[in-house]
């Protein structure tokens, strides 16, 4: 009797209960084979997954079907094609943050050719960011980003000309400190551009938009940015002036130079001339400017007199070029400089009669004298030649 009763109770359960769903162990029965591949287009793609690496990943305690949801009801083998994994199903906050990004379009799935989550984080080997083997560990970020951004065909952020941003970064100070020295406190791509909310430079909300660059740089260079904010440039920027310089106006975005290197110092005048062409032209006419133009970095340049980040108007008592401060400013190079020494005019324009009348009229007098001398002796030489010719012709006759 009990056997009959047991059959009536258990048999219906066996009939209606589905077979067990795929487990991670079931998946590795096939995917632990390193020869397992499939053909996508003309490429042969490996389907091999290292079980040990997967177990150490951040998803190692999850079942495969937690991500591959379309296989949740599969009882045995599945079709070769599976639906793309939607990372946003779990990481909805990150997906929302990424929605306005220039990378939006394939946040885990397929489609437009934009990067997927796996392109930056990996697939089955995703490790915490602080793990030095992680693709998004600071030391590895440039290589991860350059997998897509290494092309020299990409347009530069500062203009339409092609720019090898990865090569520039590697040769710049940030890249040298990070890649060659291994110091992970140096800036990497996501420190400036963001991690998920990466926006175009033309987007006002972008971390690298002109209005936000200084705030972005201040995350590392706090002291310098604070000093800059008190300068004439910083004040004009705070007032909303469209032509006020920002960090990247003087320092390159990716090929960031060491400011104390001679290769940078000899280019300072050219950088300042982008906004101050007249002052640069008058400076180049001076001894300092001409020696600098010959590549001699020790000669005084714009920041030696005006300052670098703390530039103030000449009528500000705190300015380095305020009359009372000039002896100390000039004395940095010329020991013993006094008030008479500071009467030197580094930006005198001898073409400007209103501002520099003495120079203008001396210049005018010298020009008149020069042309007068050449004119007089030119006529003299011509007449002498004619006379000599006539005398020589008379002797021959």
Image (cartoon, grey):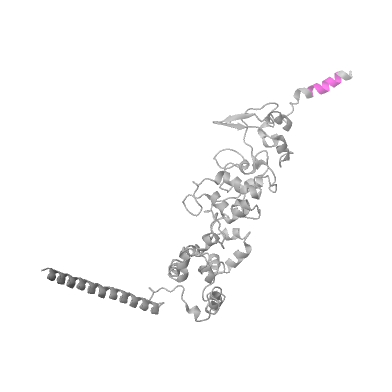
Using residue 35 as the reference point, say whether residue 62 is left or right of it: right
* 184 lies left or right of 369: right
Q: Is residue 212 visible?
A: no
Which residue corresponds to the image point at 39% horizontal and 79% vertical from the top-left?
358
Q: Is residue 76 above or below residue 97?
A: above
Magenta segment's dominant SS is helix
Q: Position of residue 343 (x, y in %)?
A: 48, 79
Instruction: Looking at the picture, tell me which residue is in the foreground, 16 or 78.
Output: 78
Q: Give above or below for 342 relative to 70.
A: below
Q: Nearer the viewer, residue 269 or 141?
A: 269
Q: Quadrant of the N terminus?
A: top right
Residue 10 rendering spot, x and y as whole percentages: 82, 23
Left or right: where does residue 180 sit relative to residue 17? Answer: left
Q: Quadrant of residue 51?
A: top right
- Taking the spot 63% from the left edge, 45% from the top edge, the residue there is 95
Q: Residue at x 29, y 75 (%)?
A: 373
> Which stretch is magenta?
4-12
Q: How many marks do you count on the picture?
A: 0
Q: Examine the structure image and report whether residue 171 is included in the region drawn in magenta.
A: no
**Residue 231 sits in quarter:** bottom right
Tell me where residue 180 appears, x and y as whole percent: 62, 52
- Residue 102: percent from the left, percent from the top? 56, 47
In front here: 62 or 60? 60
Can residue 258 be seen? Answer: yes
Q: Quarter of the image containing the C terminus?
A: bottom left
Work out whether 46 lies above or below 92.
above
Quick one: which residue is furthest to the right in this view? 1
89 left or right of 16 in image? left
């Amino acid at each position: 009797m009990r056997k009959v009763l047991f059959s009536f109770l258990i048999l219906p359960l066996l009939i209606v209960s589905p077979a067990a769903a795929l487990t991670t162990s079931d998946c590795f029965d096939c995917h632990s084979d390193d020869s397992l591949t499939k053909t996508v287009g003309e490429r042969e793609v490996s389907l091999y997954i290292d079980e040990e690496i997967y177990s150490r990943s951040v998803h190692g305690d999850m079942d495969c079907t937690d991500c591959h949801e379309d296989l949740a009801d599969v009882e045995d083998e599945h079709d070769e094609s599976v639906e793309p994994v939607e990372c946003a199903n779990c990481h909805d906050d990150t997906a929302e943050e990424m929605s306005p990004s220039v990378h939006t379009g394939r946040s885990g799935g397929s489609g437009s050719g934009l990067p997927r989550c796996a392109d930056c984080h990996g697939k089955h080997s995703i490790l915490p960011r602080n793990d030095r083997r992680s693709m998004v560990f600071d030391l590895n970020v440039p290589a991860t980003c350059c997998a897509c951004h290494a092309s020299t065909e990409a347009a530069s952020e500062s203009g339409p000309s092609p720019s090898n941003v990865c090569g520039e970064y590697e040769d710049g100070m940030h890249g040298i400190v990070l890649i060659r020295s291994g110091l992970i406190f140096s800036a990497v791509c996501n420190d400036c551009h963001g991690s998920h909310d990466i926006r175009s430079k033309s987007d006002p909300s972008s971390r690298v938009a002109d209005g936000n660059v200084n705030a972005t740089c201040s995350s590392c260079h706090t002291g310098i940015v604070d000093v800059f904010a008190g300068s004439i440039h910083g004040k004009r920027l705070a007032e909303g002036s469209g032509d006020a310089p920002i960090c990247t106006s003087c320092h390159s975005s990716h090929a960031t130079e060491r400011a104390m290197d001679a290769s940078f110092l000899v280019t300072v005048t050219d950088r300042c001339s982008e906004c101050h062409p007249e002052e640069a032209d008058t400076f180049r006419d001076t001894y300092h400017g001409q020696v600098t133009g010959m590549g001699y970095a020790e000669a005084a340049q714009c920041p030696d007199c005006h300052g670098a980040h703390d530039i103030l108007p000449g009528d500000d008592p705190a300015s380095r070029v305020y009359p009372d401060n000039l002896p100390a400013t000039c004395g940095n190079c010329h020991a013993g400089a006094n008030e008479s020494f500071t009467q030197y005019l580094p930006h005198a324009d001898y073409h400007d009669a209103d501002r520099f009348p003495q120079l203008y009229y001396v210049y005018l007098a010298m020009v008149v004298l020069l042309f007068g001398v050449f004119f007089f002796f030119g006529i003299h030489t011509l007449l002498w030649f004619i006379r000599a010719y006539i005398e020589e012709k008379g002797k021959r006759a």
